[in-house]
Image: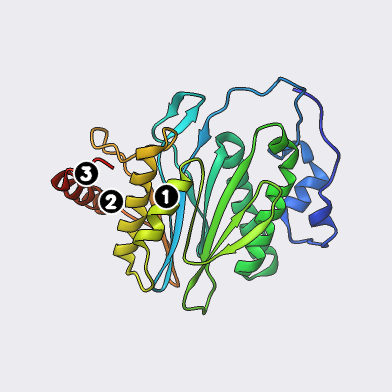
Amino acid sequence: MGGQVGRGFPALEAGGTSSSFFDHVSRSNPELLPFRTSMGPGQLPATPHGTTIVALSFAGGVLMAGDRRATMGSMIANRHIEKVFPADRHSVLGIAGTAGIAIDIVRLFQVELEHYEKIEGTQLSLEGKANRLGAMIRANLPMALQGLSVVPLFAGVEAGEPAGRLFSYDVTGGRYEELEHHSVGSGSVFARGALKKLWRPGLSADEAVAVAVESLIDASDDDSATGGPDLVRQLWPVVYLVTADGAARVGQDALAAVVEAIVARRTAERREA
């Protein structure tokens, strides 16, 4: 491992974000941040990578779901990894890319939002949360250029708003609001195809869960880095629903019923593709 890169993160410091925990750590103990080291040429370690995340809107909220597989090259590194997390009470975060750095960024983002709420006495707006996450992804750019990229999806419901919003990012921290649905990760091209066919305006929460699970099954069917539902180990995707009442994880029994219904229908149809 090489030494530290330059101190400070201009994007946050220039904004005078005194309530930012990320800003505080970058000034006082930058060595604690997950993206503060650099590596020399050819020093890229073998690290687990996570895919695939899908997100979609439904009547009254947004949904985010991720498969459970992490890969390291051609190997399955982990079958139980979780890639979707609650960011706070009204937003969720999904990650694709280098698993270790991504999970550290998720934890840092969770603390960032909690720190802001404690300092300011109110929640950050959904737009503000999306911007803060973009700044963290931008700070990881030196690592991304060395092959250790993190690509998140962010979704949530603003207090008092009737519908949720979805945000995607690129490795430079560029933030883009998505309409209807989106997917990231190596299986995203296949998941997006399924979402285009299955999503429609006004989906109920239960229908949205079925659409998300079926899109992940389609992704796992064509992308070896995406894990499908594991009927033997009883492993299902991680699915979160966010409404005005808050973020809630969909239970294992409900997911098992959705998976079994999809598998039974496809088996009865004797589908090849």
Query: In terms of secondary structure, where does tag 3 sit?
Result: loop
Task: Name which residue type carries label 2.
Answer: Leu
Earlier-in-chain disc, 1 versus 3: 1
What distance separates the C-alpha of mark 3 from that of mark 2?
Answer: 22 Å
Please give the name of the residue rendered at 57% of the width and 49% of the height, measured from the top-left corner: 152
Return the mark for residue 258. Answer: none
**In which quadrant will I find the C terminus?**
top left
Please give the name of the residue rendered at 64% of the width and 39% of the height, measured from the top-left corner: 149
Residue 244 locus on image (x, y percent): 45, 72
Return the mark for residue 255. Answer: 2
Judge the density around disc 3: few (<14), some (14-19), many (≥20) Cα neighbours within 10 Å: few
Earlier-in-chain disc, 2 versus 1: 1
- Give the foreground label among 1 and 3: 3
Q: Is residue 104 above or below residue 147?
A: below
Query: In terms of secondary structure, where does tag 2 sit?
Result: helix
Residue 75 locus on image (x, y percent): 45, 23
Task: Name which residue type carries label 1.
Answer: Ala
Q: Residue tagged by mark 1?
A: 191
Between residue 92 and residue 214, name the one nearer to us: 214
Between residue 168 and residue 222, name the one nearer to us: 222
**In which quadrant will I find the N terminus?**
top right
Q: Residue tagged by mark 3?
A: 271
- Give the foreground label among 3 and 2: 3
